[in-house]
Image (cartoon, helix red, strand yellow):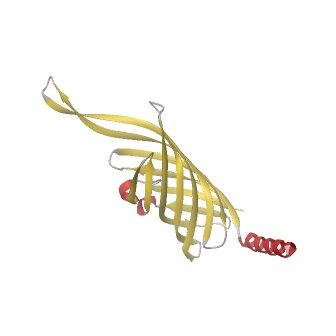
Amino acid sequence: MKKIILSLAMVAMSAVAVNAQFLMGGSLGLAAGNGQTRFEMNVTPTFGYSFNEHWEAGASLLLGGGLYASESYAFNEELMTVMPSTQTTKSFNWAIEPYARYYFFNRNNWRVGIEGLARVGGLVDVASSGMAVTWGFNFFPVVTYSPKEHWVLIASCGFLGIGLNGVERSCEFGLNVMNGGGNQLGFGFAYQF
């Protein structure tokens, strides 16, 4: 019985391995907006596995930084008026993001699909060295183009997705164009081997 189960497992693994390809690459992401003024830039090295023409799975390591500006108002006793003040914060962020992609359109060298990812990471305020835990679950569209046999160009549109994102114990749910989850716009590449 053991030999039969082991043989079936090896046949199944070899059938998956024949159609699958590893992929390695990365992307550059930009994000802006989200209530308070913000600008983020992220670099995301990625390693994944393409099971067939419809399914891919993998993980990314997000590394980046951002500038956040928030306005507050204070009463100035000398002028007897309320004065606005702007505070700018620099931050460094990192996250581990396992993902899965499903491609529902596959024509010539173009593929269009949806990516789902989970995120856990940290956000470090550079000035105070304070750190907050960040997390999220997001679904958004992905478009890929293969100019050569092993090369793939990837564009992800995080602002068109939906997600649940949080910092520490607070969270936001809804369209990512509203709550700013993850990379809002990402461009990358992958090499399949």
Q: Residue 136 location, x and y as percent? A: 48, 54
Q: Which quadrant of the rendered structure holds the N terminus?
A: bottom right
Taking the spot 55% from the left edge, 66% from the top edge, the residue there is 144
Q: Residue 96 location, x and y as percent? A: 57, 50
For the view shown, which residue lies furthest in the left direction?
80
Q: Is residue 37 left or right of residue 96?
A: left
Q: Residue 181 location, x and y as percent? A: 44, 54
For the view shown, which residue lies furthest in the top direction?
78
Taking the spot 49% from the left edge, 44% from the top edge, the residue there is 133
Q: Residue 20 location, x and y as percent? A: 71, 69
Taking the spot 70% from the left edge, 66% from the top edge, the residue there is 21
**In which quadrant of the rendered view does residue 67 lie?**
top left
- Judge whether 129 appears above or below 167 on screen: above
Nearest to the observer: residue 10 or residue 29: 10
Taking the spot 51% from the left edge, 61% from the top edge, the residue there is 155
Q: How many marks?
A: 0
Q: Which quadrant of the rendered structure holds the C terminus?
A: bottom right
For the view shown, which residue lies furthest in the front direction?
1
